[in-house]
């Protein structure tokens, strides 16, 4: 019998596996030269989603996109925290970050 978390929806082993997944924060450049920052655990799929109009609402009709930056993070929480930090940067600070990669 599997061990379940409090909600009973996921086994503890599945939750542990989710914590170990590699997540990325990424920045893409849109057709209008704006920068979009997001997170994913599958870069190629997420870029495809953006290109097909199934990504974020912001990126709809702003393609084609160019992947400018990726950063590995330790789990989804780490990626979300780093995304928040990057989104608070000015455009100039983001461009500096891109140049340093």
Image (cartoon, rainbow, N blue to C red):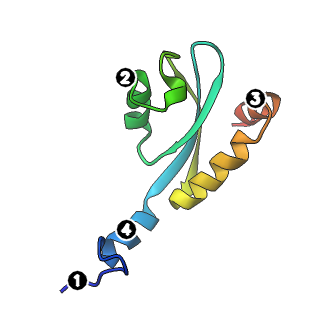
- Report, in whole angstroms, how far the alpha carbon at label 2 lies from the one at label 4: 29 Å
The residue drawn where x is 29% and y is 71% is 9
Seen as rendered, the residue at the extreme left is 1
Residue 54: which quarter of the image? top left
Q: Is residue 95 left or right of residue 59?
A: right
Mark 4: secondary structure: helix
- Report, in whole angstroms, how far the alpha carbon at label 1 lies from the one at label 3: 48 Å
Residue 72 sits above or below residue 101 on the image:
below
Seen as rendered, the residue at the extreme top is 32
Residue 75 at x, y = what percent? 51, 60
Mark 3: secondary structure: helix
Mark 1: secondary structure: loop
Pick the front one: 21 or 101: 21
**Residue 52 circle label:** 2
User: Mark 2 Cα within 10 Å, few/some/many (few <14, many 20+)?
Assistant: few
Label pair 3/4, CB-CB below 8 angstroms: no
Residue marked by disc 3: 95
- Mark 1 vs mark 4: in front: 1
Say whether disc 1 or disc 2 marks the residue closer to the N-terminus.
Answer: 1
- Mark 3 vs mark 2: in front: 2
Say whether disc 1 or disc 3 marks the residue closer to the N-terminus.
Answer: 1
User: Mark 1 Cα within 10 Å, few/some/many (few <14, many 20+)?
Assistant: few
Residue marked by disc 4: 17
Mark 2: secondary structure: loop
**Residue 2 circle label:** 1
Residue 100 at x, y = what percent? 74, 36
- Report, in whole angstroms, how far the alpha carbon at label 3 lies from the one at label 4: 34 Å
Say whether disc 3 or disc 2 marks the residue closer to the N-terminus.
Answer: 2
Residue 79 at x, y = what percent? 58, 53
């Amino acid at each position: 019998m599997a061990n379940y978390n409090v909600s009973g929806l996921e086994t503890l082993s599945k939750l542990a596996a989710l914590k170990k997944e590699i997540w990325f924060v990424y920045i893409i450049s849109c057709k209008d030269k704006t920068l979009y920052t997001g997170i994913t655990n599958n870069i190629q799929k997420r870029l495809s989603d953006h290109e097909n109009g199934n990504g974020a609402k912001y990126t709809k009709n702003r393609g084609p996109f160019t992947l400018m930056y990726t950063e590995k993070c330790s789990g989804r929480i780490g990626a979300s925290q780093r995304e928040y930090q990057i989104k608070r940067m000015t455009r100039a600070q983001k461009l500096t970050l891109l140049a340093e990669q």
